[in-house]
Amino acid sequence: MDTQLSKKNQLKLSHWKTTNFNVIIFDISHVNEALTSYKTKAVDGIIGADILLSGKAIIDYSNHYLYLR
């Protein structure tokens, strides 16, 4: 699988922001193909544990919210 690395990135979600982290870029079309039978929305990307931990993430699955501090 072809992958690329992007360094020194910035991410801002509402009022939360982080800088200087790496992003791994690769094709996830196979994920979306597998999900078509479930009639779900397409996956655009995956947020890694490094971002979730640095943002002290709280995931509210029942209400579909992601909280970052």
Image (cartoon, helix red, strand yellow):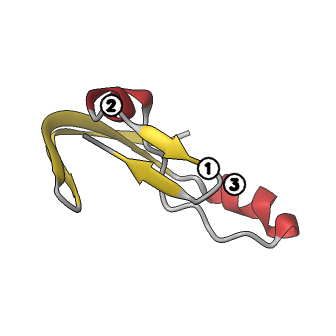
Q: Residue shown at 56%/59% (left/top)?
A: 64
Residue position marked by numbered label 3 in the rendering = 30
Q: Position of residue 47 (x, y in %)?
A: 43, 43
Marking on residue 56: 2
Total marks shown come to 3
N-term-proximal mark, 2 vs 3: 3
- The answer to whether residue 3 is above or below residue 63 is above
Q: Assign the N terminus to one quadrant of the image.
A: top right
Q: Assign the C terminus to one quadrant of the image.
A: top left
Circles 2 and 1: CB distance less than 8 Å? no
N-term-proximal mark, 2 vs 1: 2
Q: What kind of residue is marked 1? A: Tyr
Residue closest to the eye, 33 or 61: 61
How packed mark 1 is, by other alpha carbons closer than 10 Å (few <14, some 14-19, many 20 or more), is few
Q: Position of residue 67 (x, y in %)?
A: 37, 47
Residue closest to the eye, 2 or 62: 62
N-term-proximal mark, 1 vs 3: 3
Residue closest to the eye, 34 or 19: 19
Q: What kind of residue is marked 2? A: Lys
Which of the 4 image quarters holds residue 21?
A: top left
Residue closest to the eye, 50 or 31: 50
Q: Position of residue 23 (x, y in %)?
A: 30, 40
Q: Is residue 54 left or right of residue 65?
A: left
Q: What kind of residue is marked 3? A: His
Label 1 sits on a secondary structure element that is loop
- The answer to whether residue 15 is above or below residue 57 is below
Residue position marked by numbered label 1 in the rendering = 61
Q: Position of residue 59 (x, y in %)?
A: 50, 43
Label 2, label 3: how far apart the Cα atoms are: 30 Å
How packed mark 2 is, by other alpha carbons closer than 10 Å (few <14, some 14-19, many 20 or more), is few
Q: Residue shown at 59%/59% (left/top)?
A: 63
